[in-house]
Each structure stands twice: as structure tokens, then as C-alpha cells.
Amino acid sequence: MRRGRFAPTPSGKMHLGNARTALIAWLHMRAAGGEFVLRMEDIDTERARAKWAELALLDLRWLGLDWDEGPDVGGPYAPYTQSERLERYEDALHKLEAAGALYPCYCSRADILGAASAPHGLGSEGPAYAGTCRHLSPAERADKARSKDPSLRFALPEGRDVTFVDGIAGPQVFPAGSGGDFVVRRADGLHSYQLSVVVDDADMRITDVLRGYDLLDSTPRQIWLDEALGLPVPEFLHVPLLNGSDGKRLAKRHGGIAISSFRERGTPPERLVGWLAHVSGLIDRPEAISAAELIGHFDLSRIPREAVVVDVPDI
């Protein structure tokens, strides 16, 4: 049985880009006769808010999307909220530590930015981590630990390229060492996105990870973690983003993109779903249509392979 998911971060109101990804992920599973899971990625307690999580559920249901398992309906792989799954992430860390795949890092952000020889990181990141703390002696680590709590970094396998075929973006190659050793637990104890999402997807038996193109560069790190933890690697599919008329990723600065704003001013959900389907290449014009009616129109090959420039719909 194929299983997909949508995993929003409740750090603000759901917007057009989030909703488009949710719609495509939902259609991908419904058209395949698979199961759809909703997971709330609220692990960043500094940004996540319960009110935004509740609003996300309301917005998704208003759009006509449903889920077989999730924080409000339960399921066999509960809990579906990351803040309730911290023990699972600690278990994974213990397994990685036992395998010698982690090491403590005492470097500050300023230290990393100041490493002139460090190669550039993945995606929009700054310099890749140069491995400064990877080869510290026990005595050197003990000395640094007296003044600073360390983060934990995953040591990338030596000489291990990552190659995979993305279901939308096509063949991908990430050379060994891409992005440098990465943090799996911050110095303040917060588990990283990379670790939590790998554990969650495995625990919830996710076979298809469909998400935004901005997360494509996270994929090699998640594959490395899957392999280190002995977990199955899901199929990855990354949807190109929606950009505003200024060519930049659609965001709050473009105004009027929150799903709740359309709902509150009385926009029929079918009109917004039709617009989302149109900019996703699933229908030829932005006509009113329900999410359920789109299942028969779904064809992954019609999803654009490049970012789509849009104006915020006046509907």
C-alpha cells in the first residue's frame, strides 16, 4: 500500500504555496488508491503555535482534503505531532551514537562563517561545515565542554555520493561531502528537521514523500540518515514553487495569500481549488472544481518542472 503525507509547520497561516503542495500530495495518493497521512511538524517550539496547527486543519478541510491518519483522527502510528515524539528522536540518536556516526560540535555560527576555506553549503545555506570538531581528541573535547554545550553532528560517510531519481525533478546527483557534516541535535537540545522527518516517515510507513522544491537539497541528508539507521528510503517527489510577479517565492510580502483570508471573505473553496489545479498544470483553465473531482484529472507528468510565476488570485 502506497502511503503519502503532508507535514505542515504551524508557524503561521497556511498560504497558497502550502495549499498547492497539500493538494498535489493528496491527489497523488488518492489517484493511486493509497493512504494519506497528516503530520504536524511543530518540533521548533520557538516558532510553532497550537492556534496555527488548528487553523491548518480547518483550512485543509475547507479545501476538501481529508486524511486517513493524523493528529485529530489518530491512527496506528500515532502520535502524529512531532512535539509528542521526542523519545523516538532520542532513540535514533542513541543508535547513531552507538554506530559512531555522530560527534559533538562546539563551533558557533560565527566560527563556521569565519572558516574561509569552507565550501558552500546545500541550497541557500551559508558555508558548509568544514569538520573542525570531527577529529578533536577526547582531551580537546573535554576542554571545550567546560565552556560550551555541544550540538551533535552527523559525520557524512567518506566517498559516498547520493544519487536518486526524483519523481518530478528527475535524476539527482549529490557528490560525497555535499553540505558538510550536519546538525542532528542543537546545543539547546532541539532535534533537527533532518532527523525528525526521517524517523517520522519510517515510523509512519511513508512510501512517497511529495513536498516543495525548496526541500530537494535536504534529501541527500535524509538518505544518509536512512541508511545509517537501517531504514527504508522512500520515493521523493519535489514540486517546483510558486513565485510572485517579482520572481521571488510567493510569501507574505505579496499580500493576500493566506488560505483563511479567502475562506473568511466568502470565496467558494472550489474556485480556489480550481486556481491551484490550473497553476499546477492539472486543468487547462482556472474553473471551479472540487478536490474530489480532480482525482480523475491527476497526472503527475503535467506538474510543471520549473517554478510558476503567478499573481495572487482576486477571487
Image (cartoon, rainbow, N blue to C red):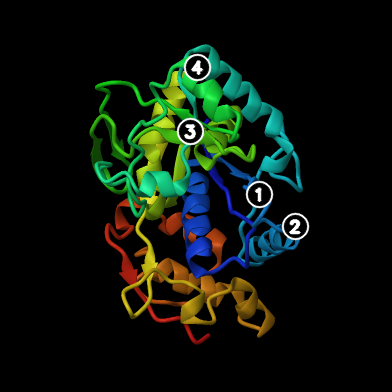
Q: What element carries label 4?
A: helix
In front of the other: label 4 or label 2?
A: 4
Q: How crowded is mark 4: few (under 14 residues within 10 Å), some or many (20 or more)?
A: few
- Considering the numbered disc 1 on the image, is that residue within a helix, a strand or a loop? loop
User: Which of labels 1 and 4 is toward the front?
Assistant: 4
Which sits earlier in the primary sequence, circle 3 or circle 4? 4
Label 2: which residue? Answer: 50
Residue at position x 60%, y 34% from top? Answer: 149
* Mark 4 residue type: Ala
Q: Is residue 131 above or below residue 231?
A: below
Q: Which of 99 and 148 is in front in this view?
A: 148
What residue is disc 1 on? Answer: 42
Q: Residue under label 3, please give it.
A: 207
Between marks 1 and 3, how big is the CA–CA gap? 22 Å
Few, some or many residues within 10 Å of mark 2 (<14, 14–19, 20+): few
Q: Identify the mark nearer the N-term, 1 or 4.
A: 1
Q: Is residue 197 left or right of residue 57?
A: left
